[in-house]
Image: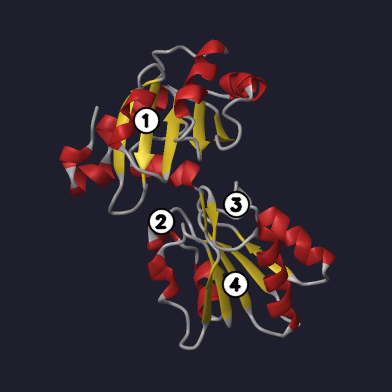
Amino acid sequence: MSRVMIVGAGPGDPELITVKGLRAIQEADVIFYDRLAAPELLQEAAPGTELVYCGKEPGRHSMSQEELNSRLILEAAKGRRVTRLKGGDPFIFGRGGEEADVLQQAGIAYDIVPGITSGAAVPAYAGIPVTHRDYASSVTFVAGVSKAQDSEYWRHAAKASDTLCIYMGIRSLPEITRHLIRHGRDGSTPAAVIQEGTTARQKTITGTLDTIAGKLHEVEQPAMVVIGDVVKLGEQLAWFEAAARPAEVVG
């Protein structure tokens, strides 16, 4: 029986994969990959490696989580080297913990290979440090999906830290921003939405907690939302977009 490697692919730039994660791709017999893993990483797989897409998009899943869990167990039980390639970090809003739990219950050995999470990397590529000695001593990663109407959830988030990084929050951002303001966040707090961060399609839109939801027509998913005074540093530190396409940074 083989091991399953649960690998974080990083935020989109294929060069941000870890050395251990890259080796797990190169040595795999079968790779189960999702839609946010950089396609270039699959080119590192050995000839003959079976590639299985199991991505999830809003309202449409190519494979249910239960089916994926069963396939991971089945392939490992055959003695195949299995790599589960997930965008970002598998243990940060990636359901990697659920997959590891299922494997453990089935008696399947596994390794967790952390990846660079979008909440840290995407703001960095937009020139936004999520912590800064003068602006923010704390940061909170928040899931926006399925939590938009939960006022109590956003009451805690509003007071949690200086910087909020919101994953999967684009569709519900108007409601999320209303909750945050209602629970004490100043409407003038700087905010940014960063589209497809760390990739060639990266685009940053900035505003305030009051105005950012009204600018969503300018971005596409996937995107990361950053709220806090650190966003003000993005204009002067925006190294990635400034070098490639300075006209696409919108204030």
**Mark 2 or mark 4: which comes first in sequence?**
2
Residue 83 is situated, as x and y percent measured from the top left of the image, at 60, 72
**Mark 4 or mark 1: which comes first in sequence?**
4
Please give the name of the residue rendered at 72% of the width and 55% of the height, measured from the top-left corner. 98
Question: Which quadrant, please, contains the C terminus?
Answer: top left
**Mark 1 or mark 3: which comes first in sequence?**
3
**Distance CA(mark 4)–CA(mark 1):** 34 Å
**Distance CA(mark 1)–CA(mark 2):** 19 Å
Q: Mark 2 points at which residue?
A: 12
SS for tag 3?
loop
- Amino acid on which the number 1 mark rests in the picture: Ala
**Mark 2 or mark 3: which comes first in sequence?**
2
- Amino acid on which the number 3 mark rests in the picture: Gly
**Distance CA(mark 2)–CA(mark 3):** 14 Å
| Residue 192 - label | 1
Q: Name the residue under label 4.
A: 83
